[in-house]
Image: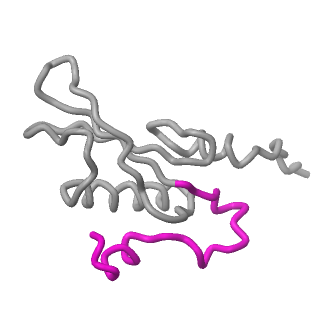
Amino acid sequence: MATAKKTAAKTPEAEVAARSADGAEGTRHVKEFVVLGPNFGDEDGPGHEPNKLATLQEAIQRGLHPRGDVSFDGCETQHDGVSQLLRYSVEVVPAVVDSEAEKTTTPRDKIENGEG
């Protein structure tokens, strides 16, 4: 008879870190984009909305439920002097422990509210 393999329960922070490819800050899922083109600067604005939607989508695909708005956390010029790394984050709850899944912020929510 086969026995079920037991795994130690992870903290929400450890679960978010394990599921976030670009890193995590506590229970904030981090997404980074490398782009070419005009300087985005350190200001948030409408040009960031597609990346914010993609950040929500990636979190959901990785088993994380976003809560609230995605923040633009800044940009850095890369070593090539042409491309930029744009960094975004959003507070999340691991889906496996989410008792209030209906509070998940989805890309559709943002688009329907005219934010995307």
Q: 28 and 4: which one is in front?
A: 28
Q: Is residue 26 left or right of residue 86?
A: right
Against 1, residue 74 (above or below) is above
Q: Is residue 44 a member of the stretch shown in magenta?
A: no
Q: Is residue 4 left or right of residue 15?
A: right
Asked which quadrant contains residue 55, the reply is bottom left
In percent of the image, x 55 and y 71: which residue is there? Answer: 104
In percent of the image, x 47 and y 59: which residue is there? Answer: 61
Against 83, residue 68 (above or below) is below
Asked which quadrant contains residue 31, the reply is top left
Q: 116 and 45: which one is in front?
A: 45
Against 23, residue 89 (above or below) is below
Give, as a single range, the part of the protein colored magenta.
91-116
Horizontal and vertical percent position of residue 26: 62, 41
Q: Is residue 93 a member of the stretch shown in magenta?
A: yes
Horizontal and vertical percent position of residue 84: 21, 32
